[in-house]
Amino acid sequence: MTDDSRGFHKPVKRPAETFDRLFAAEDPAEVSRVAHSTAHALVARVRAEPDDAVVDRLIAFTGEHGIDDVAELWSRSPAKSLPGALWRLYLLQLMIHDDPQSAALLYERGRHALDSVDSVVAGAPAPAGPAELVVLINTILRGLFQGDFAVALERAAAFCRVEAAGSTHLADDYESTEPERSSGFTTRALRLSTYAGDLAACAALWRRESLN
């Protein structure tokens, strides 16, 4: 896994390492309003009538359409908001689907490195291979629409902490021999740790009915 961009078949996706993208907007207030209204409408409607076929389509959305359509709606939303949480979860899904082998490597390194219950909370089997992580992130996304929303966010946060720990350890491995690659893993670890905090905060806000 590197931080270099790679080519993809259409629909165009972003590399697993690309966690953030900014979009120009003539009216930021209107963009924010649309982001929040679409996120709330989507979640409320599907959770009210959780049809399996609809949920399946939502889980598969980025695989069929790429990340851009989702990003245009939610990527600039505050981290501790409903659209911000959805954006981060779709990025995690893309990260795993795009490179499940690397995600599994990081997860296993992190699982052994962390002295915590995060791997248990995340819910992946031990050991977790590429296929198991694909199933895990899809299950977490399904939980947003058909289960306990806060629990789904907490599982995603725990997953991020495990992956961040794995990234940190791989950065240490490459520090003396491949410093540029080490820097890439360090950057990824920081982003994943930040995402873990964001998602955990969103879970707490949801439980207080304050995730806007």
Image (spheres, helix red, strand yellow):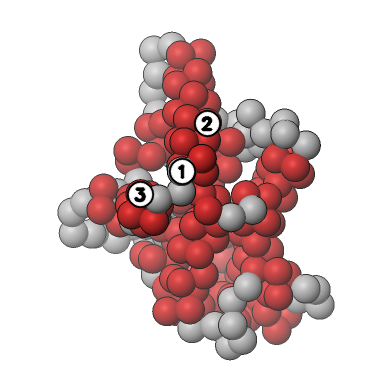
Q: Is residue 169 visible?
A: no
Counting from the top left corner in percent of width and height, residue 161 is at 68, 64
As rendered, which of 161 and 119 lies closer to the eye? 119
Q: Decide: few, some or many residues near mark 1? Use Cα within 10 Å; few <14, some 14-19, many ≥20.
A: few
Q: CA distance from mark 1 to mark 3?
A: 9 Å
Q: Is residue 127 visible?
A: yes
Counting from the top left corner in percent of width and height, residue 107 is at 59, 75
Q: Please, is residue 164 above or below residue 201 in the view?
A: below
Q: Quadrant of residue 208?
A: top right
Residue drawn 62% across the image and 34% down it: 81
Q: Nearer the viewer, mark 1 or mark 3?
A: 1
- What residue sits right under mark 2 in the picture? 40
As rendered, which of 21 and 58 lies closer to the eye? 58
- What residue sits right under mark 1 in the picture? 49
Whether the residues at callouts 1 and 3 have beta carbons within 8 Å, the answer is no
Q: Is residue 113 left or right of residue 187?
A: right
Q: Nearer the viewer, mark 2 or mark 3?
A: 3
Whether the residues at callouts 2 and 3 have beta carbons within 8 Å, the answer is no
Mark 1 or mark 3: name the one nearer the start of the chain.
Answer: 1
Q: Please, is residue 25 above or below residue 193 in the view?
A: above
Three-letter residue code for mark 3: Val
* Secondary element type, mark 2: helix
* Secondary element type, mark 1: loop
Q: Decide: few, some or many residues near mark 2? Use Cα within 10 Å; few <14, some 14-19, many ≥20.
A: some
Q: Say which quadrant the C terminus sits in.
A: top right
